[in-house]
Amino acid sequence: MKTAQPLQKILIISLSGIGDAVMFSPALHLLRQTYPDAAIDLLCMFKGVEDIFKRNEDINAIFRWDFLKASPFASLKFVLSLRGQYDASISTYPANRWEYNMINAFVGAPKRLAHDYNHCNISSLSLLNTHRVQEDDKLHNVEENVRLVELLG
């Protein structure tokens, strides 16, 4: 993969469970190889996901926020505290929920990456993302995440 335009700060939004987070690991490593000097941070919702990535050398910082237990107002305030800090944000696959796309939009990175899903695409508000790749049912989740990261470079 050729070197892309330098990005200084990238936020990975991985709000699903441990299994889906692990499926992003190869794409994360590829992202680090492509952007070795970038700060790559992770936003997650579950402690298990935080535990998996806290010793991962490809991650600079982890933000864990329990969107299920926190009030909507507190969650919005938290997400807005991240606003304007990132050059790109990536919503890991699968994330076919309108809430995840709203969070990505509220973070406000100029490049917001996610998937266009084959089902419920309009209701999931994927149009809030600036760079999208069409979901391919024939691909493994790992491959879907790699395709997503390749949108940056």
Image (cartoon, rainbow, N blue to C red):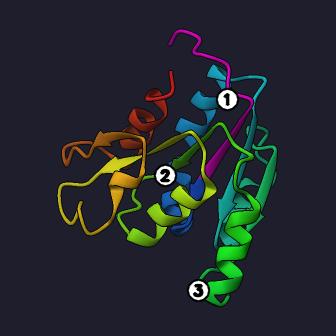
Residue found farthest to the top? 2
Residue at (62% x, 56% y) in the render: 107
| Secondary structure state at the residue bearing disc 1 | helix
In the picture, measured across the screen, residue 12 lies left or right of residue 117, that is: right
Task: Report the magenta residues as a range.
Answer: 1-12
Give the prevailing secondary structure in the magenta stretch. loop
Disc 1 from disc 3: Cα separation? 30 Å
In the picture, measured across the screen, residue 114 lies left or right of residue 64, that is: left
| Tag 2 residue | 92
- Contact, CB < 8 Å: mark 2 with mark 1? no
In the picture, measured across the screen, residue 112 lies left or right of residue 59, that is: left
Using the image, tell me which numbered label, if any, was put on residue 84. none
The magenta stretch spans residue 7: yes
| Secondary structure state at the residue bearing disc 3 | loop
Identify the amino acid type marked 1. Arg
Residue nearer the viewer, 42 or 7:
7
| Tag 1 residue | 32
| Tag 3 residue | 68
Q: Position of residue 78 (x, y in %)?
A: 73, 71
